[in-house]
């Protein structure tokens, strides 16, 4: 039981229904409890979905609490951390998942949308790490896992200009946080998913042409599943990864390993 007595906090994690399309947070929470986790605080701005997930998890006997959290607001973070401290007196794991994706180009994106994307993916991560660190230190240390994207590693006309930029910033911040929080026994790592079917990407998955196009670029020839990412999150959150901090874990089915071979019409 890797997570016995542990308390986990996840952002952008309202989609937890196994009978529907789950997000990274939902898949992580279920596996966390299966491995002995004590309590999970799931946060999101989608209140109705979050409350449904809270009720669903509790109906299975799990100590789960939904809280509304706008990751760009410091006062929201303070409220969540204060609740966790007062109820559990510890925080062992923080998973920063919240994000938005808009595929608009540099010339087309609205400045307010650009700013919103940056706020969620950069300010949101910063506030989460800073507000969680003291309680984690009081707990004897902990693990922070930031969710970036393979889009942080390469330019693209598929992700949009703001998304890749913001996710790239997360990687550098993860490394800085790992250096600065090591003396508190807090490890900070980043996971970079490829094309994974979640509520976030469902519009692409359902588009047959778009879906086939993306799979054609994946050496493993399939979409990723939320559990593929949850497994990585929980590995990094566990003692199995006790010597890992400031690390990047790329889970993209091989997309960024190299270029796929294009059939040569001269081949026989």
Image: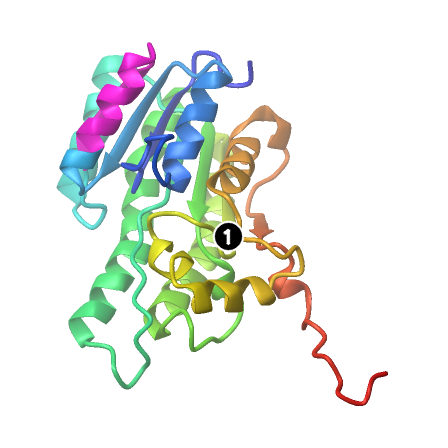
Helix, strand or loop at mark 1: strand
Picture residue at 33% right of the left edge, 71% below the top: 103
Q: Position of residue 63 (x, y in %)?
A: 30, 14
Residue 84 appears in the figure: no
Numbered circles on residues, count: 1
Q: Position of residue 150 (x, y in %)?
A: 51, 60
Instruction: Tell me the residue that label 1 is attached to.
Output: 193
- Quadrant containing the C terminus is bottom right
Seen from the viewer's position, the closer of residues 50 and 96 is 50
Looking at the picture, does residue 141 appear above or below residue 1?
below
Q: Residues within 10 Å of mark 1 (few under 14, many from 20)?
A: many
Picture residue at 52% right of the left edge, 65% below the top: 212
Q: Position of residue 82 (x, y in %)?
A: 20, 25
Residue 5 appears in the figure: yes
**Residue 67 included in the magenta stretch of the image:** yes
Asked whether, in this view, residue 93 is left or right of residue 236, the answer is: left
Picture residue at 28% right of the left edge, 31% below the top: 42
Seen from the viewer's position, the closer of residues 89 and 97 is 97
Q: Position of residue 27 (x, y in %)?
A: 43, 33
Picture residue at 56% right of the left edge, 62% below the top: 215
Seen from the viewer's position, the closer of residues 186 and 34 is 34
- Quadrant containing the N terminus is top right
Q: Which residues are magenta?
A: 50-68
**Residue 151 included in the magenta stretch of the image:** no
Asked whether, in this view, residue 140 is left or right of residue 219, the answer is: left
Question: Most extreme residue toward the bottom, as rendered?
Answer: 266
Looking at the picture, does residue 39 appear above or below residue 180?
above
Looking at the picture, does residue 203 appear above or below residue 263?
above
Question: Most extreme residue toward the right, as rendered?
Answer: 268
């Amino acid at each position: 039981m890797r997570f016995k007595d542990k308390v986990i906090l996840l952002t952008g994690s309202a989609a937890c229904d196994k009978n529907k399309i789950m997000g990274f947070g939902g898949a992580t929470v279920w596996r966390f409890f299966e491995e002995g986790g004590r309590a999970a605080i799931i946060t999101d701005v989608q209140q109705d979905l979050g409350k449904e997930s809270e009720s669903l998890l509790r109906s299975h006997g799990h100590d789960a609490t939904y809280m509304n959290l706008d990751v760009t607001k410091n006062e929201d973070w303070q409220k969540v951390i204060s609740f966790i401290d007062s109820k559990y007196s510890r925080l062992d794991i923080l998973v920063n998942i919240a994000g938005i994706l808009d595929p608009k180009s540099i010339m087309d994106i609205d400045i307010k949308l650009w700013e919103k994307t940056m706020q969620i993916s950069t300010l949101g991560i910063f506030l989460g790490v800073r507000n969680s660190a003291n309680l984690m230190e009081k707990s004897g240390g902990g693990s922070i896992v930031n969710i970036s994207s393979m889009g942080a590693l390469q330019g693209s006309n598929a992700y949009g200009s703001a998304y890749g930029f913001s996710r790239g910033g997360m990687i550098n911040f993860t490394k800085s946080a790992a250096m600065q929080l090591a003396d508190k026994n807090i490890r900070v790592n980043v996971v970079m998913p490829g094309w994974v079917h979640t509520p976030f990407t469902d519009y692409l998955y359902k588009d047959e042409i778009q879906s086939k196009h993306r799979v054609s670029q994946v050496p493993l020839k399939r979409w990723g599943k939320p559990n593929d990412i949850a497994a990585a999150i929980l590995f990094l959150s566990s003692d199995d990864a006790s010597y890992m901090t400031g690390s990047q874990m790329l889970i993209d089915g091989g997309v960024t390993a190299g270029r796929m071979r294009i059939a040569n019409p001269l081949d026989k």
